[in-house]
């Protein structure tokens, strides 16, 4: 049994001499930072991306590795679409946490600064398309009337809604 399986896991105090508050942040481009320095180690960045969760009581963002957890800051989306694969012509999204999912029209929207977002299936977290992934969407995009952008999948063309906070 891992510590995360205990019902009081998120209620336990931080280890002695430590705090649950961290100076780790995830910026709007999908880069992790710690105490003002970008996290350069690829394995650490991948680990952080897989540890992202919400605190079950207060809803704040946490990094939870199953043995310990800390709060961290998310400046935009907690996940990022890193690239798009194309198995049999269907867009397959590859996300920063290592998950993949088939692009679903109803889950895509355009946000601030024309960034494209999608809902991640299993966590229900928002994933923001990286610049590279957003450019890779081009084969499935069409300009509609009134300047709207449409997404063409499986012979159907639907406008991508805008959601700006």
Image (tube, helix red, strand yellow):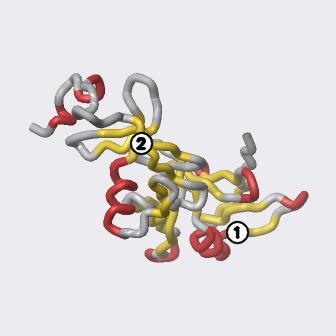
Q: Which mark is residue 80?
A: none
Which image quarter: residue 47?
bottom left
| Residue located at (46% from left, 46% from top) | 23
Which is more foreground, mark 1 or mark 2?
Answer: 2
- Residue 21 pos. (x, y %): 41, 36
The residue positioned farthest toward the left in the image shown: 1
Q: In the rendered view, tell whether residue 122 sits above or below residue 135.
A: above
Tell me the quarter of the image containing the C terminus.
Answer: top right
- Residue 122 pos. (x, y %): 39, 46
Q: In the rendered view, tell whether residue 31 sits above or below residue 52.
A: below
Instruction: Give whichever of 36, 60 is nearer the camera.
Output: 36
Q: Which mark is residue 141?
A: 1
Q: Tell me the SS state at disc 1.
A: strand
- Estimate the spatial distance between the alpha carbons at disc 1 and disc 2, rounded to whole Å: 40 Å
Asked whether the residues under the numbered discs 1 and 2 touch, taking CB atoms below 8 Å apart as contact, a structural biologist would say: no
| Residue located at (75% from left, 57% from top) | 113
Tell me the quarter of the image containing the N terminus.
Answer: top left
The residue positioned farthest toward the front in the image shown: 17
The residue positioned farthest toward the right in the image shown: 146
**Residue beneath label 2, please?**
22
Left or right of residue 112: residue 148:
right
Q: Tell me the SS state at disc 2.
A: strand
Instruction: Give whichever of 130, 157 is nearer the camera.
Output: 130
Q: In the rendered view, tell whether residue 88 sits above or below residue 51.
A: below
At label 1, counting other C-alpha atoms closer than 10 Å, the crowd grade (few under 14, some 14-19, many 20 or more) is: some
Left or right of residue 6: residue 145:
right
- Residue 26 pos. (x, y %): 51, 53
| Residue located at (56% from left, 49% from top) | 77
- Residue 128 pos. (x, y %): 58, 56
């Amino acid at each position: 049994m891992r510590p995360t399986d205990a019902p009081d896991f998120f209620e336990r105090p931080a280890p002695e001499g430590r705090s649950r508050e961290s100076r780790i942040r995830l910026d709007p481009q999908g880069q992790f930072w710690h105490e003002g320095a970008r996290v350069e180690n690829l394995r650490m960045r991948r680990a952080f991306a897989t540890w992202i969760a919400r605190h079950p009581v207060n809803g704040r963002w946490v990094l939870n590795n199953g043995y310990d957890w800390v709060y961290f800051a998310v400046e935009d989306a907690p996940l990022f679409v890193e690239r798009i694969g194309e198995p049999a012509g269907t867009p397959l999204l590859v996300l920063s946490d290592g998950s993949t999912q088939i692009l679903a029209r109803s889950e895509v929207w355009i946000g601030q600064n024309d960034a494209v977002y999608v809902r991640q299936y299993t966590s229900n977290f928002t994933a923001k398309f990286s610049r590279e992934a957003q450019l890779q969407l081009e084969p499935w995009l069409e300009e509609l009337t009134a300047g709207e952008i449409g997404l063409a999948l499986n012979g159907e063309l639907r406008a991508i809604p805008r959601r700006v906070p």
